[in-house]
Image (spheres, rainbow, N blue to C red):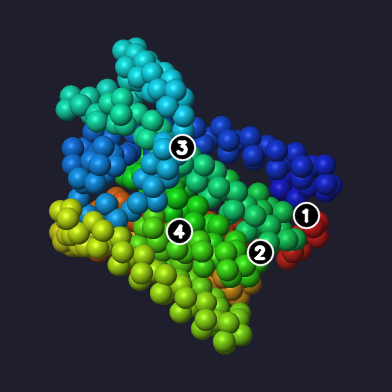
Protein backbone atom coordinates (compact mmCIF):
# COMPACT_ATOMS: atom_id res chain seq x y z
CA UNK A 1 0.00 0.00 0.00
CA UNK A 2 2.70 2.46 1.03
CA UNK A 3 4.79 1.64 -2.03
CA UNK A 4 1.84 2.62 -4.19
CA UNK A 5 0.89 5.74 -2.31
CA UNK A 6 4.46 6.95 -1.85
CA UNK A 7 6.21 6.23 -5.17
CA UNK A 8 9.95 6.01 -4.83
CA UNK A 9 10.96 7.44 -8.18
CA UNK A 10 9.92 10.05 -10.72
CA UNK A 11 8.80 7.40 -13.23
CA UNK A 12 6.27 5.92 -10.79
CA UNK A 13 4.87 9.37 -10.13
CA UNK A 14 4.37 9.87 -13.87
CA UNK A 15 2.45 6.57 -13.99
CA UNK A 16 0.22 7.75 -11.16
CA UNK A 17 -0.45 11.09 -12.83
CA UNK A 18 -1.30 9.41 -16.14
CA UNK A 19 -3.52 6.84 -14.41
CA UNK A 20 -5.46 9.42 -12.40
CA UNK A 21 -5.73 11.64 -15.50
CA UNK A 22 -7.18 8.81 -17.60
CA UNK A 23 -9.65 7.94 -14.84
CA UNK A 24 -10.80 11.56 -14.58
CA UNK A 25 -11.18 11.88 -18.34
CA UNK A 26 -13.32 8.72 -18.54
CA UNK A 27 -15.27 9.43 -15.35
CA UNK A 28 -16.07 12.95 -16.56
CA UNK A 29 -18.39 11.40 -19.18
CA UNK A 30 -20.43 9.82 -16.40
CA UNK A 31 -20.46 13.13 -14.52
CA UNK A 32 -21.88 14.90 -17.57
CA UNK A 33 -24.56 12.23 -17.98
CA UNK A 34 -25.49 12.79 -14.33
CA UNK A 35 -25.49 16.53 -14.98
CA UNK A 36 -27.86 16.16 -17.95
CA UNK A 37 -30.03 13.81 -15.90
CA UNK A 38 -30.24 16.28 -13.05
CA UNK A 39 -30.78 19.42 -15.12
CA UNK A 40 -33.65 21.58 -14.04
CA UNK A 41 -33.67 23.46 -17.36
CA UNK A 42 -34.51 20.70 -19.88
CA UNK A 43 -38.18 20.84 -20.76
CA UNK A 44 -39.16 22.81 -17.68
CA UNK A 45 -41.45 25.35 -19.28
CA UNK A 46 -40.64 28.82 -18.03
CA UNK A 47 -37.30 27.50 -16.69
CA UNK A 48 -36.16 26.02 -20.01
CA UNK A 49 -33.07 27.24 -21.83
CA UNK A 50 -35.28 28.52 -24.63
CA UNK A 51 -36.99 30.90 -22.23
CA UNK A 52 -33.68 31.92 -20.67
CA UNK A 53 -32.01 32.55 -24.04
CA UNK A 54 -35.00 34.60 -25.25
CA UNK A 55 -35.10 36.46 -21.88
CA UNK A 56 -38.57 35.24 -20.88
CA UNK A 57 -37.60 33.12 -17.89
CA UNK A 58 -37.86 34.08 -14.22
CA UNK A 59 -35.49 35.79 -11.87
CA UNK A 60 -33.10 35.11 -10.21
CA UNK A 61 -32.00 32.55 -12.82
CA UNK A 62 -32.12 35.22 -15.51
CA UNK A 63 -29.30 36.99 -13.65
CA UNK A 64 -26.85 34.11 -14.28
CA UNK A 65 -25.79 35.17 -17.76
CA UNK A 66 -22.21 34.04 -18.42
CA UNK A 67 -23.06 30.71 -20.15
CA UNK A 68 -25.82 32.43 -22.14
CA UNK A 69 -23.45 35.19 -23.29
CA UNK A 70 -20.90 32.53 -24.23
CA UNK A 71 -23.46 30.60 -26.29
CA UNK A 72 -24.73 33.72 -28.06
CA UNK A 73 -21.25 34.99 -28.92
CA UNK A 74 -20.01 31.63 -30.22
CA UNK A 75 -23.24 31.16 -32.20
CA UNK A 76 -22.84 34.59 -33.75
CA UNK A 77 -19.27 33.97 -34.94
CA UNK A 78 -19.89 30.40 -36.12
CA UNK A 79 -20.37 30.23 -39.91
CA UNK A 80 -23.98 29.59 -40.87
CA UNK A 81 -23.25 26.38 -42.76
CA UNK A 82 -21.41 24.99 -39.70
CA UNK A 83 -24.32 25.79 -37.39
CA UNK A 84 -26.77 24.18 -39.79
CA UNK A 85 -24.63 21.06 -40.20
CA UNK A 86 -24.24 20.63 -36.43
CA UNK A 87 -27.96 21.27 -35.89
CA UNK A 88 -28.87 18.69 -38.54
CA UNK A 89 -26.58 16.12 -36.91
CA UNK A 90 -27.98 16.79 -33.43
CA UNK A 91 -31.54 16.78 -34.77
CA UNK A 92 -31.13 13.24 -36.09
CA UNK A 93 -29.10 11.99 -33.13
CA UNK A 94 -31.45 13.19 -30.43
CA UNK A 95 -34.61 12.05 -32.21
CA UNK A 96 -33.39 8.53 -32.92
CA UNK A 97 -36.07 6.48 -31.17
CA UNK A 98 -33.72 3.75 -29.94
CA UNK A 99 -30.80 6.09 -29.33
CA UNK A 100 -29.11 6.60 -25.99
CA UNK A 101 -30.01 10.27 -25.57
CA UNK A 102 -33.66 9.84 -26.50
CA UNK A 103 -33.93 6.90 -24.09
CA UNK A 104 -32.24 8.93 -21.36
CA UNK A 105 -34.73 11.76 -21.77
CA UNK A 106 -37.61 9.26 -22.01
CA UNK A 107 -36.64 7.73 -18.69
CA UNK A 108 -36.39 11.18 -17.26
CA UNK A 109 -40.07 11.63 -18.01
CA UNK A 110 -39.56 14.94 -19.77
CA UNK A 111 -40.66 13.94 -23.24
CA UNK A 112 -44.40 14.14 -22.61
CA UNK A 113 -44.53 17.91 -22.36
CA UNK A 114 -41.92 18.50 -25.02
CA UNK A 115 -38.35 19.66 -24.63
CA UNK A 116 -37.76 23.15 -26.09
CA UNK A 117 -33.99 22.59 -26.07
CA UNK A 118 -34.46 19.92 -28.77
CA UNK A 119 -36.04 22.41 -31.15
CA UNK A 120 -33.68 23.22 -34.01
CA UNK A 121 -33.08 26.93 -33.15
CA UNK A 122 -31.87 25.96 -29.67
CA UNK A 123 -29.93 22.75 -30.33
CA UNK A 124 -26.65 24.51 -31.08
CA UNK A 125 -26.80 26.99 -28.13
CA UNK A 126 -27.72 24.10 -25.81
CA UNK A 127 -24.73 22.12 -27.09
CA UNK A 128 -22.45 25.11 -26.48
CA UNK A 129 -23.69 25.54 -22.91
CA UNK A 130 -23.15 21.83 -22.19
CA UNK A 131 -19.65 22.03 -23.72
CA UNK A 132 -18.88 25.06 -21.57
CA UNK A 133 -19.94 23.13 -18.49
CA UNK A 134 -17.78 20.18 -19.50
CA UNK A 135 -14.73 22.39 -20.05
CA UNK A 136 -15.37 24.06 -16.67
CA UNK A 137 -15.66 20.64 -15.00
CA UNK A 138 -12.24 19.61 -16.34
CA UNK A 139 -10.83 23.05 -15.52
CA UNK A 140 -12.09 22.75 -11.96
CA UNK A 141 -10.37 19.39 -11.50
CA UNK A 142 -7.18 20.69 -13.13
CA UNK A 143 -6.88 23.73 -10.89
CA UNK A 144 -7.66 21.71 -7.77
CA UNK A 145 -4.70 19.53 -8.76
CA UNK A 146 -2.47 22.53 -9.49
CA UNK A 147 -3.46 24.08 -6.16
CA UNK A 148 -2.58 20.84 -4.38
CA UNK A 149 0.83 20.88 -6.06
CA UNK A 150 1.37 24.45 -4.87
CA UNK A 151 0.09 23.93 -1.32
CA UNK A 152 1.58 20.47 -0.72
CA UNK A 153 4.79 20.37 -2.78
CA UNK A 154 6.29 17.51 -0.74
CA UNK A 155 3.06 15.48 -0.38
CA UNK A 156 2.54 13.56 -3.60
CA UNK A 157 -0.27 11.52 -2.02
CA UNK A 158 -2.31 14.67 -1.34
CA UNK A 159 -1.62 15.85 -4.89
CA UNK A 160 -3.16 12.64 -6.26
CA UNK A 161 -6.06 12.58 -3.81
CA UNK A 162 -7.17 16.14 -4.68
CA UNK A 163 -8.28 15.73 -8.35
CA UNK A 164 -9.59 12.25 -7.61
CA UNK A 165 -11.86 13.43 -4.79
CA UNK A 166 -12.72 16.61 -6.70
CA UNK A 167 -14.52 14.76 -9.47
CA UNK A 168 -15.94 12.01 -7.23
CA UNK A 169 -17.74 14.67 -5.17
CA UNK A 170 -19.86 15.95 -8.06
CA UNK A 171 -22.30 13.19 -9.26
CA UNK A 172 -24.15 12.85 -5.91
CA UNK A 173 -24.87 16.58 -6.17
CA UNK A 174 -25.52 17.24 -9.86
CA UNK A 175 -27.60 14.06 -10.28
CA UNK A 176 -30.33 15.60 -8.12
CA UNK A 177 -30.15 19.25 -9.18
CA UNK A 178 -28.18 20.91 -11.94
CA UNK A 179 -28.30 24.26 -13.67
CA UNK A 180 -26.55 25.66 -16.71
CA UNK A 181 -24.23 27.88 -14.61
CA UNK A 182 -23.16 25.22 -12.07
CA UNK A 183 -19.82 23.93 -13.32
CA UNK A 184 -18.53 27.45 -14.10
CA UNK A 185 -19.00 28.10 -10.37
CA UNK A 186 -16.70 25.17 -9.59
CA UNK A 187 -14.17 26.37 -12.15
CA UNK A 188 -14.03 29.95 -10.90
CA UNK A 189 -13.69 28.85 -7.29
CA UNK A 190 -10.79 26.49 -8.08
CA UNK A 191 -9.09 28.86 -10.53
CA UNK A 192 -9.30 31.91 -8.29
CA UNK A 193 -8.05 29.92 -5.31
CA UNK A 194 -5.04 28.95 -7.42
CA UNK A 195 -4.50 32.59 -8.42
CA UNK A 196 -4.52 33.72 -4.78
CA UNK A 197 -1.98 31.06 -3.87
CA UNK A 198 0.33 32.60 -6.48
CA UNK A 199 -0.69 36.20 -5.63
CA UNK A 200 -1.85 37.05 -9.15
CA UNK A 201 -4.14 39.78 -7.88
CA UNK A 202 -4.98 41.53 -11.16
CA UNK A 203 -6.13 38.30 -12.77
CA UNK A 204 -8.00 37.34 -9.60
CA UNK A 205 -9.91 40.61 -9.69
CA UNK A 206 -10.84 40.11 -13.34
CA UNK A 207 -11.94 36.57 -12.47
CA UNK A 208 -14.22 37.89 -9.73
CA UNK A 209 -15.95 40.09 -12.33
CA UNK A 210 -16.52 37.12 -14.66
CA UNK A 211 -17.69 34.95 -11.77
CA UNK A 212 -20.21 37.64 -10.79
CA UNK A 213 -21.68 37.62 -14.29
CA UNK A 214 -22.09 33.86 -13.83
CA UNK A 215 -23.67 34.03 -10.36
CA UNK A 216 -23.87 36.55 -7.56
CA UNK A 217 -22.49 34.05 -5.01
CA UNK A 218 -19.07 35.21 -6.22
CA UNK A 219 -19.29 37.36 -3.11
CA UNK A 220 -17.79 34.34 -1.31
CA UNK A 221 -14.68 34.75 -3.48
CA UNK A 222 -14.41 38.36 -2.36
CA UNK A 223 -14.78 37.14 1.23
CA UNK A 224 -11.95 34.67 0.59
CA UNK A 225 -9.73 37.51 -0.62
CA UNK A 226 -10.64 39.61 2.41
CA UNK A 227 -9.81 36.85 4.91
CA UNK A 228 -6.62 35.78 3.15
CA UNK A 229 -5.37 39.22 2.13
CA UNK A 230 -5.80 40.72 5.59
CA UNK A 231 -2.68 38.86 6.73
CA UNK A 232 -0.95 38.03 3.45
CA UNK A 233 -0.83 41.44 1.74
CA UNK A 234 0.47 44.92 2.56
CA UNK A 235 -2.37 47.01 3.92
CA UNK A 236 -2.51 49.51 1.02
CA UNK A 237 -2.47 46.74 -1.61
CA UNK A 238 -5.13 44.81 0.29
CA UNK A 239 -7.46 47.81 0.54
CA UNK A 240 -7.02 48.80 -3.10
CA UNK A 241 -7.90 45.39 -4.50
CA UNK A 242 -10.70 44.73 -2.03
CA UNK A 243 -12.39 48.04 -2.85
CA UNK A 244 -12.00 47.41 -6.58
CA UNK A 245 -13.55 43.96 -6.30
CA UNK A 246 -16.49 45.29 -4.30
CA UNK A 247 -17.07 48.08 -6.85
CA UNK A 248 -16.97 45.59 -9.75
CA UNK A 249 -19.33 43.25 -7.93
CA UNK A 250 -21.97 45.87 -7.16
CA UNK A 251 -21.74 47.53 -10.58
CA UNK A 252 -22.17 44.21 -12.41
CA UNK A 253 -24.96 43.10 -10.10
CA UNK A 254 -26.72 46.46 -10.42
CA UNK A 255 -26.45 46.46 -14.22
CA UNK A 256 -27.76 42.88 -14.57
CA UNK A 257 -30.62 43.55 -12.15
CA UNK A 258 -31.59 46.70 -14.03
CA UNK A 259 -31.29 45.06 -17.45
CA UNK A 260 -33.65 42.21 -16.50
CA UNK A 261 -36.11 44.36 -14.55
CA UNK A 262 -38.84 43.48 -17.08
CA UNK A 263 -38.76 39.76 -16.17
CA UNK A 264 -40.91 38.19 -13.50
CA UNK A 265 -39.57 36.63 -10.34
CA UNK A 266 -37.63 37.70 -7.28
CA UNK A 267 -34.27 39.31 -6.66
CA UNK A 268 -33.35 36.29 -4.56
CA UNK A 269 -35.26 33.17 -3.58
CA UNK A 270 -35.83 32.67 0.14
CA UNK A 271 -38.89 30.39 0.11
CA UNK A 272 -36.70 27.29 0.57
CA UNK A 273 -36.02 28.31 4.17
CA UNK A 274 -39.54 27.30 5.17
CA UNK A 275 -39.06 23.95 3.45
CA UNK A 276 -35.96 23.30 5.54
CA UNK A 277 -37.84 24.28 8.70
CA UNK A 278 -40.77 21.95 8.03
CA UNK A 279 -38.66 19.06 6.75
CA UNK A 280 -36.37 19.18 9.80
CA UNK A 281 -39.03 20.07 12.36
CA UNK A 282 -38.75 16.60 13.91
CA UNK A 283 -34.97 16.54 13.82
CA UNK A 284 -32.84 14.63 11.34
CA UNK A 285 -31.36 11.17 10.95
CA UNK A 286 -28.74 10.16 13.50
CA UNK A 287 -26.46 9.03 10.68
CA UNK A 288 -26.68 12.55 9.24
CA UNK A 289 -25.35 13.83 12.55
CA UNK A 290 -22.53 11.27 12.50
CA UNK A 291 -21.68 12.26 8.94
CA UNK A 292 -21.41 15.91 9.94
CA UNK A 293 -19.16 15.06 12.89
CA UNK A 294 -16.90 12.93 10.67
CA UNK A 295 -16.77 15.64 8.01
CA UNK A 296 -15.69 18.26 10.58
CA UNK A 297 -13.09 15.86 11.97
CA UNK A 298 -11.74 15.13 8.48
CA UNK A 299 -11.59 18.76 7.37
CA UNK A 300 -10.11 19.96 10.65
CA UNK A 301 -7.52 17.21 11.11
CA UNK A 302 -4.05 18.72 11.70
CA UNK A 303 -5.63 22.17 11.65
CA UNK A 304 -2.41 23.94 12.61
CA UNK A 305 -0.68 22.46 9.54
CA UNK A 306 -3.38 23.49 7.06
CA UNK A 307 -2.37 26.25 4.60
CA UNK A 308 -3.84 29.63 5.49
CA UNK A 309 -6.01 29.85 2.37
CA UNK A 310 -7.74 26.56 3.27
CA UNK A 311 -8.39 27.83 6.77
CA UNK A 312 -10.06 30.86 5.17
CA UNK A 313 -12.28 28.60 3.05
CA UNK A 314 -13.34 26.69 6.15
CA UNK A 315 -14.29 29.94 7.88
CA UNK A 316 -16.48 30.75 4.85
CA UNK A 317 -18.06 27.26 4.78
CA UNK A 318 -20.70 27.89 7.52
CA UNK A 319 -21.92 30.98 5.65
CA UNK A 320 -22.20 28.93 2.46
CA UNK A 321 -24.26 26.38 4.39
CA UNK A 322 -26.46 29.24 5.63
CA UNK A 323 -26.97 30.39 2.03
CA UNK A 324 -28.07 26.84 1.17
CA UNK A 325 -30.56 26.79 4.06
CA UNK A 326 -32.07 30.10 2.93
CA UNK A 327 -31.97 29.73 -0.86
CA UNK A 328 -31.68 26.00 -1.62
CA UNK A 329 -33.91 22.96 -1.34
CA UNK A 330 -33.23 20.11 1.13
CA UNK A 331 -31.09 18.17 -1.40
CA UNK A 332 -29.81 21.14 -3.40
CA UNK A 333 -26.20 20.92 -2.22
CA UNK A 334 -25.10 22.58 -5.49
CA UNK A 335 -25.79 25.90 -3.77
CA UNK A 336 -22.49 25.31 -1.93
CA UNK A 337 -20.33 24.66 -5.02
CA UNK A 338 -18.05 27.62 -4.19
CA UNK A 339 -16.59 25.86 -1.17
CA UNK A 340 -16.03 22.50 -2.93
CA UNK A 341 -12.43 23.13 -4.13
CA UNK A 342 -11.30 24.34 -0.70
CA UNK A 343 -12.99 21.46 1.09
CA UNK A 344 -11.53 18.90 -1.34
CA UNK A 345 -8.03 20.29 -0.81
CA UNK A 346 -8.43 20.27 2.98
CA UNK A 347 -9.77 16.70 2.95
CA UNK A 348 -6.95 15.54 0.65
CA UNK A 349 -4.37 16.99 3.02
CA UNK A 350 -6.02 15.30 6.00
CA UNK A 351 -6.23 11.92 4.25
CA UNK A 352 -2.58 12.09 3.23
CA UNK A 353 -1.55 12.95 6.79
CA UNK A 354 -3.63 10.10 8.23
CA UNK A 355 -1.88 7.62 5.97
CA UNK A 356 1.42 8.67 7.50
CA UNK A 357 0.49 7.70 11.06
CA UNK A 358 3.37 5.64 12.40
CA UNK A 359 5.63 6.82 9.59
CA UNK A 360 7.50 10.02 8.94
CA UNK A 361 5.35 13.08 9.45
CA UNK A 362 6.14 14.29 5.97
CA UNK A 363 6.81 12.54 2.72
CA UNK A 364 10.44 12.75 1.76
CA UNK A 365 9.90 12.44 -1.96
CA UNK A 366 9.37 15.76 -3.65
CA UNK A 367 7.40 16.14 -6.82
How far separated are the C-alphas under marks 3 and 2? 40 Å
Residue of label 2: 151
Q: CA distance from mark 4 to mark 1?
A: 33 Å
Q: Residue at x 55, y 78 (%)?
A: 229
Determine the CA span between mark 4 and mark 3: 21 Å
In-image side of 353 versus 191 (left or right): right
Q: Which residue is mark 1?
A: 367
**Whole-percent x and y of residue 345?**
57, 59
Frontmost of labels 3 and 1 is: 3
Residue 279 placed where, x, y %? 18, 56
Of the pair 313 and 284, the residue shown nearer to us:
313
Residue that carries the numbered disc 4 in the rendered image = 210
Mark before the other along the chain sequence, 3 or 1: 3
Would you say 364 lies left or right of 333 here?
right
Disc 1 or 2, which lies upstream in sequence?
Answer: 2
Does the residue at mark 1 contact the one at mark 2 (Cβ under 8 Å)? no
What quarter of the picture does the N terminus occupy?
top right
**Rounded to the nearest whole Å, what is the CA distance between mark 1 and mark 2?**
12 Å
Give the secondary structure at mark 3: helix
Residue 257 can be seen, yes or no: yes
Residue 296, given in percent of the width and then of the height, sits at: 46, 65
Residue 294 visible in rendering: no
Against 54, residue 332 (above or below) is below
Which numbered disc flags the more N-terminal residue, 4 or 1? 4
Callout 2: helix, strand or loop? Answer: helix
Q: Earlier in the sequence, mark 3 or mark 2?
A: 3
Going from N to C along the chain, the mark reached first, 4 or 3, is 3
Q: Are marks 2 and 4 in contact (CB under 8 Å)?
A: no
**Dot 1 crowding, Cα within 10 Å, few <14, some 14–19, many 20+:** some
- Crowding at mark 4 (Cα within 10 Å: few <14, some 14-19, many 20+): some
Residue 77 tag number: 3
Q: How much space separates mark 3 and mark 1, taking CA atoms?
A: 43 Å
Amino acid sequence: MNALLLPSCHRHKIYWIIGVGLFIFCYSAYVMISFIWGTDFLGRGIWSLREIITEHSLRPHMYRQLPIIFAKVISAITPKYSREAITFFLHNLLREKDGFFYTLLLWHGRNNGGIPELEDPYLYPTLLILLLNYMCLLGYVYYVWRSAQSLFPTMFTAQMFAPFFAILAIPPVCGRFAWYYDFPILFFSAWLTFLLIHRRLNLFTMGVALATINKETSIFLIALFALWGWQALPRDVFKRYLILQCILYFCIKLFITFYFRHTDGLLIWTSCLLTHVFVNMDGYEFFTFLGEVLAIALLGYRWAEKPQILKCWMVIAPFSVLAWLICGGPFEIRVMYEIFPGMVLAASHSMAMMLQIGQNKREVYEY
